[in-house]
Every structure is written in C-alpha cells, then in structure tokens.
C-alpha cells in the first residue's frame, strides 16, 4: 500500500510538471495524416519530443546501440554563489568616529615607522617597549611659526532603524545622532609678528544633536534619497580673533602698532551664569518646552543617483540644506584687546629720564582681568549646520561590483571655520567580495582636512562589523606622517 501511494505521488508530480512545461512552450500540434507512413503512436511520440521531454536520435533506418555521453555533457552546472543581499530590517548601533589632527607635530617625529615597529614587535613586547621611539627625536619648531591649526570632529550615532524592500524603496529613523566639530588656529603673521591687516584666527566649533528620517526610492534609472531632519545646537562659537601690525602716528611721532582683538561669543542651549556649569541640568529640565519651541532648526539631506550603464553611476549628495534656522540666545562673552603702540613713546624722553620715565597711557594695553560675562541675545543667534554638495561617480572598470572607483568633487560652506567656503573631493576605491567582506581606501579632502583612510567591513547579513582608520592633517604632505588620526567603529544587526 505504501509503495502504491508513493507511485501515485511521483506520478502526479511528473504529470503536473509535464503540464506546466507544455503551457510554457509554444509548439505546433501535429495531426495524423493517414496518407503518410507511420502510426498514431509516432505522432504522439513526436508531440512528446516537441515538449522537450525527450531528445530523439537521428533516424537512419538502422538500430544504434546506446553510447555513453561525454563526461563534460553529463556535468551539471555548478550553482554559483551569489552576493549577500542587503538586509530588509536593520539596527545600526553605536556608529562612532573620532578625528583629531594638527599641522605641527606628527607621530613620525616621535615614533618609528609602522612597518619598522611591526617587524620588531616581538622585541618590543618582550624586551623594551621604548623601541617604538625614534633614536633621535627631532621637532622642527619653525613649522609652528608657519601657522598652527588644530581640528576635532567626532560623531556618535547611537541608534538607527532602517527598512529596505529589495533595494527598491526604504525608510528609517535616526535617533539622537550627535556631531561635535571644533577648530583652533593661529595665523602665521601673528606668530612671526609680521606686518598684517585684519589677519583672522581663533576658536570655532559647534555641537549638534539631530533626529532624521532617511527615505529612498527608485524612479526608472534614478535613485532618490531624502533625509528631513530636526536638529538642536548644543553650543556654537565662531572664530573671531583679529591680528593687526602696521604703522601708527601720535603727536608727530611715527611708530608701529601691534594688536590682537578678540571677540569670543560662546552660545549655549543652557544658561551659564558666571561660568557656572553646575546648573545646566536643572535649566534643561525646567525649560525643555521652551527649547523645543525656540531653539530647534530644520534642514534636508538630498541625493540623486543615475545609473548611466552597467559600469557607471553618477550622482550628487546634498547635506544639511537649510529649511528653517535654529537659534540660541544665551552666551558667554569674552571681549578684549591686547596692543602695543610705539608712536606714544618718545625715545628722547626715555633717554633723558631713564629710570624715572613713565610709559604714557596708550602705549600699551591689556585687560586687567580676562572676565567672562554671561549675556543674552534677545534676537537670537541664527545657527545653520555645515552645508555640503558633493558630485560623485561609481565606476566599475570590470563591469562587476568587485572593484569600484569613486571620484568626488564638491564644496562646503560653514561659518565655524576661518575659510567659510572650501572645496571637497578625492578618490576612493572599494574592493567588494560578494558583499561579505569589503575594503575601502581613499585619499580625500573633507572638512578642511586631508584624510588617507582605510575601512574594513565584515558582513554575515545578521551581523555587520565596521572598522576604519585614517591618517590626516590640514596639509597634504603631513597627512602621510600621522599628524592626525581618525578611528571609526560600528555594528549593524538585521535580517
């Protein structure tokens, strides 16, 4: 009874497959012609042959013995391993990057080359850790007087949720993303005490927290990306130190006036009285409704990518397009001037009076105390996040995703830097192994910094680990000597 049931089951599968195959093929139904040789069974056999069930041998009128087919014809086509598909649901956790750079001291001024350390790692660990240092540590102090720059850029993205429908459309939610940007600069002419007019330097920076909703969809050969976001500035300061060196005149005397004028206004989301930060938490809890109503800003991220052909995509990404500005009202105020003016000094009087000579008022000046005051801007300080527009291409030289070259070029605008506008761009290369493991390396100029980066991604679809490092500096040559470092790390979970 069991054998009979199995027979019926397999017979049903065979018949159903035969039926589907017949529906899927276009064939001509042959009718039996009694005037031609053959039987109705021959016509039925021809129908079976036309449906692709059997392949007839060539008819020669002679009976042939069956011969074995060559091995290569009997080989079954091996199933090719395809790339992992992108996750339909994804949780992105603790995406963190820290970047610090300067244009004066580099790691290569103190430590040996990484390749030397690597080849001597056993001796370093077992014998003397000090072997990582150079035999002669030399720091060229003259480079400091060529102008000093320091930059900090840190991003923390604690949680992002994304939905992806077979790469056709998708949306997500970015929660509590934080970006801290800071820079400090001293101009060359100020450090060398050279003649200058309105030479700028100082401290600039900002911290933002945001919530965004990324969305993407495809329209024909175009991929459209949109990210509306609401952001909250936590603190904000623009660099505003002005250095001057020039001729001056007083009562017929000619001299030189050197001055440094500083106007630092550090805006904050919370009110700071007399530099006391201890009341910050109480202020935030008591005024959170006012913060939501008065301080929030809105901007838009936008991207458009066109699939030109199988080996080239071209696109543009726009970041932080202003829609409605944020405002901060409370700030710490530090204003003052330090100057020396030799036109007030009469050399003849100095020689005549010697020890009894008193320097006249106006010959020099400085604040008696660097007093930091708490103030309020009733109109509010308008604050926008740094704006960027980047054009790029994805070039696949082998017409396959295993290798992609990504050239980019664009610009950025931000008031927290001395140079409000700057060019952005560079070249990156991505080696992608079936979307399981890929490496991305590049040389790019972003956020006024040269970055030589190397990123690694290990993806099992359920879990993805991202790790990246970079060497960077404000100067191209020093970016290869580790004048700055960048590290980024993140985890992604999903299915």
Image: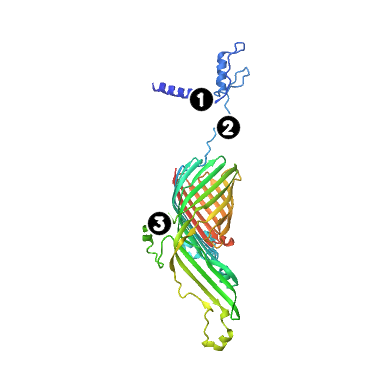
Label located before the other in sequence (3 or 1): 1
State the image quarter where residue 197 is shown: bottom right
Label located before the other in sequence (2 or 3): 2
- Between the residue at mark 3 and the residue at mark 1, the CA separation in whole angstroms equals 68 Å
Q: Are the residues flagged by discs 3 and 1 in contact, CB closer than 8 Å?
A: no
Is 414 rendered above or below residue 81?
below
Please identify the quadrant where the C terminus is shown: top left
x, y (%) of residue 85?
50, 41
- Between the residue at mark 2 and the residue at mark 1, the CA separation in whole angstroms equals 29 Å
The mark lying in front, picked from 2 and 1, is 1
Label 2 Cα neighbours within 10 Å, binned few <14 / some 14-19 / many ≥20: few
Task: Residue under label 2, please give it.
Answer: 72
Label 3 Cα neighbours within 10 Å, binned few <14 / some 14-19 / many ≥20: few
x, y (%) of residue 308?
60, 43
| Dot label at residue 290 | 3
State the image quarter where residue 146 is shown: bottom right
| Dot label at residue 20 | 1
Label located before the other in sequence (2 or 1): 1
- At mark 1, the secondary structure is helix
Q: Nearer the viewer, residue 276 or 298?
A: 298
Q: Nearer the viewer, residue 461 or 308?
A: 308
């Amino acid at each position: 009874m069991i054998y009979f049931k199995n027979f019926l089951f397999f017979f049903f599968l065979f018949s159903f497959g035969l039926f589907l195959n017949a529906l899927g093929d276009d064939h001509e139904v042959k009718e039996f012609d009694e005037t031609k040789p053959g039987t109705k069974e021959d016509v039925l056999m021809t129908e079976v042959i036309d449906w692709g069930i059997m392949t007839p041998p060539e008819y020669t009128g002679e009976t042939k013995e069956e011969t074995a087919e060559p091995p290569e014809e009997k080989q079954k086509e091996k199933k090719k391993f395809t790339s992992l598909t992108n996750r339909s649901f994804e949780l992105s956790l603790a995406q963190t990057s820290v970047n610090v750079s300067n244009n004066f001291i580099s790691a290569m001024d103190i430590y040996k080359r990484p390749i030397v350390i690597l080849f001597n790692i056993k001796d370093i660990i077992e014998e003397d850790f000090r072997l990582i240092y150079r035999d002669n540590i030399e720091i060229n102090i003259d480079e400091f007087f060529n102008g000093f720059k320091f930059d900090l850029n840190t991003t923390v993205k604690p949680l992002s949720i994304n939905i992806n429908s077979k790469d056709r459309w998708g949306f997500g939610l970015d929660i509590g993303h934080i970006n801290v940007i800071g820079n400090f600069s001293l101009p060359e002419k100020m450090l060398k005490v050279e003649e200058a007019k309105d030479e700028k330097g100082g401290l600039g920076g900002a911290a933002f927290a945001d919530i965004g909703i990324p969305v993407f969809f495809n329209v024909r050969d175009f991929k459209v990306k949109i990210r509306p976001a609401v952001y909250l500035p936590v603190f904000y300061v623009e660099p505003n130190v002005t250095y001057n060196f020039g001729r001056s005149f007083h009562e017929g005397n000619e001299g030189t006036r050197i001055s440094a004028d500083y106007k630092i206004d550090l805006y904050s989301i919370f009110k700071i009285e007399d530099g006391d930060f201890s009341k910050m938490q109480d202020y935030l809890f008591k005024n959170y409704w006012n913060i939501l109503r008065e301080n929030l800003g809105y901007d838009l991220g936008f991207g458009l990518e066109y699939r030109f052909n199988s080996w080239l995509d071209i696109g543009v990404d726009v970041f932080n397009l202003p829609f409605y500005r944020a405002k901060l009202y409370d700030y710490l105020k530090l204003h003052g001037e330090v100057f020396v003016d030799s036109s007030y000094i009469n050399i003849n009087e100095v020689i005549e009076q010697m020890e009894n000579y008193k320097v006249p008022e106006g010959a020099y000046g400085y604040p008696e105390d660097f007093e930091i005051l708490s103030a309020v801007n009733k109109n509010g300080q308008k604050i926008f996040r740094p704006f960027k527009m980047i054009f790029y291409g994805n070039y696949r030289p082998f017409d396959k995703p295993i290798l992609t070259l990504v050239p980019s070029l664009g610009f950025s605008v931000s008031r927290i830097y001395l140079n409000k506008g700057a060019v952005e761009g560079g070249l990156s290369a991505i080696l992608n192994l079936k979307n399981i493991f890929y490496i991305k390396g590049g040389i790019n100029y972003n956020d006024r910094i040269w970055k030589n980066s190397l990123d690694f991604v290990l993806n099992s679809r359920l879990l993805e680990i991202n790790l990246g490092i970079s060497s960077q500096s404000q100067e191209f040559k020093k970016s290869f000597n580790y004048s700055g470092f960048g590290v980024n790390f993140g985890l992604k979970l999903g299915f």
